[in-house]
Amino acid sequence: MPKIVPVILCGGSGTRLWPRSRASKPKPFLPLVGDRTLFEAALARCPMAGGFAPPVVVTGHKHLEHVEQQLGSVEGAQVIVEPAARNTAAAIAIAACRLPGDAIMLVCPSDHHIGNPQAFAAAALAAGDLAEQGWLVSFGIEATAPETGFGYLKRGEPIGDKGYRTAQFVEKPDLERAKAFLAEGIYAWNGGIFAFRVKDFLGELAAHRPQIAAVVADAVARGREDGQRFHPDAGIFTTVESDSVDYAVMENTSRAAMVPADMDWSDIGNWHALHEALDRDDNGNSVRGAGEAELVDCRNVLVDSDGPRVSVIGLEDAIVVVDGNDIMITTVSGVQKVGKLSGAVNQ
């Protein structure tokens, strides 16, 4: 099997992790779980010694400095600089147009946490095996709770011993439907990790979103190299339609497959998700950052301070974050609204 090419997508601003995550340095480039940043951890999960090719990183101008600083000197790595954000279908298509047709792409977000990298590697190899057979593969992440913030994949018939057909892609459900999915046992979370051959992806993209396929191919053909950087033609690329790879390709192809992945995954999509990914004491409390904290009679409280000492008494299910002159306090039930704060919107 040819080596698997990690395609790491670096975009977004992580506003729901404000004030720690900011537009100038969003969550992929922060050490939120452990000493590595989420981007560095994504790179480390795909080592060349483990059968992976050098990575292709797709990012924008505003993140380029962070990407190159944390990528380091990986021989053969490419950094594709998007002239504008046009969602994941176009971002993946740029990378595909820069690779041989038989190459297997492993598309990974740069801002997720995976606590079991060995399970990730096993799923990646299984997905690569299916991709070589012409399948377009999603990672079906084991659903451990009735989450309403994720899309779901319904498991279909087996494909050998490597995975399953994807019987259905399901949009984010309400709570009762999510509970039913969990009870049925054949639904997994769609974490946005994919594997497919370049020629299969580009063929499906051309069939279902011909404008995206044609415009990206033209932008790449007229692009320019600058060391390890590649710049698609900006004037052409900005005319491409914005669409997700799920809508554009994965939900339309007749060759959709999934591999099960039980790998301690989190999208670190908000402060509560980060708290759940951290080590906690017997009362469910966590303290992170350079600052000190004292918690008295607290349960399920996260304190994240970059300096000032924080003292908390009698709180339950709460998040306290101190970043410079900004202080953010929320209940767990309010974490989804953090991105609507004026500080997050206007950062």
Image: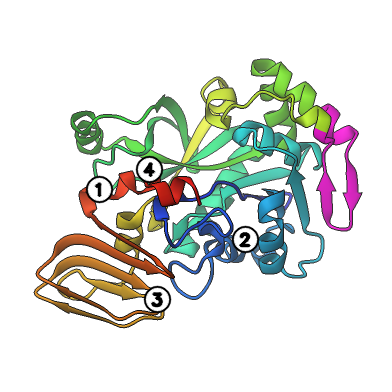
Q: Which residues are magenta?
A: 217-234
The local secondary structure at tag 4 comes to helix
Residue 11 against residue 171 in the figure, above or below: below
What residue sits 73% from the left and 57% below the top?
53
What residue sits 40% from the left and 47% below the top?
342
Q: Position of residue 79 (x, y in %)?
A: 76, 53
State whether residue 266 appears in this view. no
Q: Amino acid at mark 2?
A: Cys
What residue is shown with label 2?
Answer: 46
* 18 displayed left or right of 4: left
Precedes in sequence: disc 1 or disc 3:
3
Q: Amino acid at mark 3?
A: Gly
State whether residue 41 appears in this view. yes
The local secondary structure at tag 3 comes to loop
Alpha carbon separation for disc pair 3 and 4: 24 Å
Q: Amino acid at mark 4?
A: Lys
Which of discs 3 and 4 lies nearer the camera? The answer is 4
Is the residue under label 4 in contact with that under label 3 (CB below 8 Å)? no
Name the mark on residue 334.
Answer: 1
Alpha carbon separation for disc pair 2 and 1: 35 Å
Name the mark on residue 340.
Answer: 4
The local secondary structure at tag 1 comes to helix
Alpha carbon separation for disc pair 1 and 4: 11 Å
What residue is shown with label 3?
Answer: 289
Alpha carbon separation for disc pair 2 and 4: 35 Å
The local secondary structure at tag 2 comes to loop
Within 10 Å of disc 2 (Cα), the crowding (few <14, some 14-19, many 20+) is many
Look at the image and say whether residue 199 sits in the magenta stretch: no
